[in-house]
Image: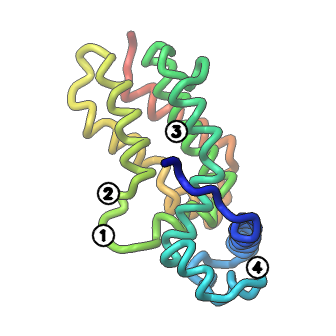
Amino acid sequence: MGARKERADAARNREAVLAAADDLFARSESPRSVSMEDVAAAAGVGKGTLFRRFGDRTGLIRALVEARIEPLRAAVESGPAPLGPATPPRERVPALLDAVLGFKLANRHLSLALEEAGSGSPYEAGHYLWWHATLRQTLERIPGLGDSGFTAHALLAATRADLVEHLAGEEGMTGEQLRAHVAALAAKVLGSP
C-alpha cells in the first residue's frame, strides 16, 4: 500500500503556512521574534493545525529550508559541474562552499533561525550533516590533504549563518566580498594541485 495522498485542503493549508512563515521571517528584525502564533494568524489557520503539521517551530523552520534548498540539493547530488559529484574535487569544494554561502545570503533570516532553533548541537542538524558529509567525501578525493572531516567542519564554519549575518549585517560586507573571502580560504586550504 502506497503513501496516502495529501488532502487538497491540507495541501493548501501547508502552502499558506509556509508562505506566511517565509514572509514573516524575511520581514523580521530577528528570527527569534517570529512565533507560531504569528505564523498561524498570518496563514489564517489554527495553532493546532500548525503544531499537528510541523510539530514545533523548529519543524516549521526545517520545512521552509527544505523547500528552498531542494533544487540546490538535487544539483549537488546528481547535477553537472561545478556542483555535481563528477566535478574534480579542487573545483567542487569551492563551488560547494559558494553554494552554501549563496543560500545563506539569499535566506539570511531563515538560515539564522534554523541555526538558532531547537536543542542540541547545530552540528548534529540534518542539513549540516548533509553538507558536511558531501564536503568531506569530496575532500577525501584530494590526496595528502589530511583529516577531511575536520577540514570540512573548518570550511563550513566560514559559512555559518550567525557569521554571515554579522559580516553582512553588522560589518556591511557585500555578498561578493564574502564569497571572495570564502573562495580565498578554500584555495589556501586546498593548496596547489
**Location of residue 90 (image quadrant):** top left
- Report the mark closest to the observer, 3 or 2: 2
Which of the two labelled residues, at mark 2 and mark 4, occupies the earlier sequence position?
4
Number of numbered markers = 4
State how far apart marks 3 and 2 are (Cα): 23 Å
- Report the mark closest to the observer, 3 or 4: 4
State how far apart marks 2 and 4 are (Cα): 30 Å
Seen from the viewer's position, the closer of residues 34 and 97 is: 34
- At label 4, which amino acid type do we have? Ala
- At label 3, which amino acid type do we have? Val
Residue holding disc 2: 124
- Report the mark closest to the observer, 1 or 3: 1
Seen from the viewer's position, the closer of residues 186 and 39 is: 39
Residue holding disc 3: 182
Instruction: Using the image, tell me which numbered label, if any, was put on residue 140.
Output: none
State how far apart marks 3 and 4 are (Cα): 38 Å
Residue holding disc 1: 120
Which of the two labelled residues, at mark 3 and mark 2, occupies the earlier sequence position?
2
How crowded pointer 1 is (Cα within 10 Å; few <14, some 14-19, many 20+) is rated as few
